[in-house]
Amino acid sequence: MAPKKQAVEEKLQLGRPGNNLKIGVVGLPNVGKSTFFGAIATVEASAENYPFCTIDPQESRVAVPDDRLDWLYEKYKPSSKIPAYLTVFDIAGLVKGASEGAGLGNAFLSHISAVDGIFHVVRAFNDPDVVHVEGEVDPSRDLDIIHRELRLKDIAMLNKYIEANERNIERMGTGGSVEDKKKKDEFAIIIKVRDWVAGDKDVRKGQWSNKEIEVLNQQGLLTAKPVTYLANVSEKDYVRKKNKYLPVIKKWIDENNPGDKLIPFSGVFETTLAGMPDENSKVAYLEENKATSAFPKIITTGYESLNLMHFFTAGEKEVRAWTCRKGAKMTEAARSIHNEIADSLIQVDVMKFVDLKAAGSEADLKAAGKLLIRGKDAIIDDGDVVYFRSGMGRAKK
């Protein structure tokens, strides 16, 4: 008799569960955060030349570009096309000592705590008219300051937990109830995480067990959040694709947070582009400068850094991209649309986008035998075009 296969434990994800996740724009004052936010959200944003001009975080939902959605819209010709969205917050500048309340540090750090990921804007341009809070442009120093402040805040939060629980844990001694063991295990995990961060390492770079991740996800730690680095260069440097600070920033990332993405952009270039009166003017501006906007790549990278993806529903009335977490089951994906569909889900008709595009139509895809039938516990893949069949009396297409 063959031995039973051991069930593989599903790896938990670091971070807040859910589909409606948010990303915050973080950096020192006067590095171009609000200019970036104002252009990416195509809204007016305060961008005065002094620190702390942005005190309350501003929020905007930006569409996630996807050529697959455009193709589906052209194919089905529905009355509406709805993209997936990324929620972006503009957070005021941090300064050295923010973790101890310097500047408006505590308020700003609480705003970072409320988001799920970070766009870290680094200044990579010289401009005598835009004062640098540290006196001169030095990306490595600026990166060190921000990461140090986030780590110090995490250490302070973890030490507060340790101080509040240490005496009770000592009183428990050895043995004890199941609940006591759970509290002791949690306390030991917090100690381990505190020591990790105190060693100048971000939580997100650690290898954590599912048990440890369950504890970490209750803490809202700042260094647990994924980071995408955005280097703000001058318009001239962006157009000519050359900037003396980019190798410095890349070297810092490789040495301190290998694997993190770096995307150059120009706040001046993007603001000019966003201010164009119509699409023809934008196209002419891009052609004149032989350049493209960095925003589609920035938005997509930020979205993916949150471990998000999207699937599609397509029909005569609407073509739509729906957001879910990578690795989500069909029931979790269906819940993005409606709880009742998820609760009474029976099966899912799945068309792989590449198969649908190659076939040219649903009818031809079905004729080729490539319409897939999946159960409610199956994993949904990025780009799947789905038809949920539920017991609520109708299917959602």
Image (cartoon, rainbow, N blue to C red):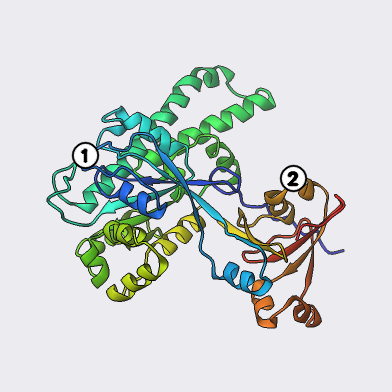
Tell me, for residue 376, which label it has, or none: none
Residue at the image point whose x is 42% and y is 27% from the top: 159
Q: Position of residue 172 (x, y in %)?
A: 58, 19
Rendered view: 234 above or below 109: below
Residue at the image point whose x is 49% and y is 33% from the top: 190
Q: Position of residue 148 (x, y in %)?
A: 31, 41
Frontmost of labels 2 and 1 is: 1
Q: In front here: 249 or 232? A: 232
Quadrant position of the N terminus in the picture: bottom right
**Pointers 2 and 1 in contact (CB under 8 A)?**
no
Rendered view: 135 above or below 289: above
Q: For the residue carrying disc 1, how many other residues have a C-alpha within 10 Å: few (<14), some (14-19), or many (20+)?
A: few
Q: Which residue is mark 1?
A: 50
Residue 307 visible in image: no
Q: In front here: 112 or 207? A: 112
Residue 177 visible in image: yes
State the image quarter where residue 242 is shown: bottom left
What type is the residue that disc 1 sits on? Tyr
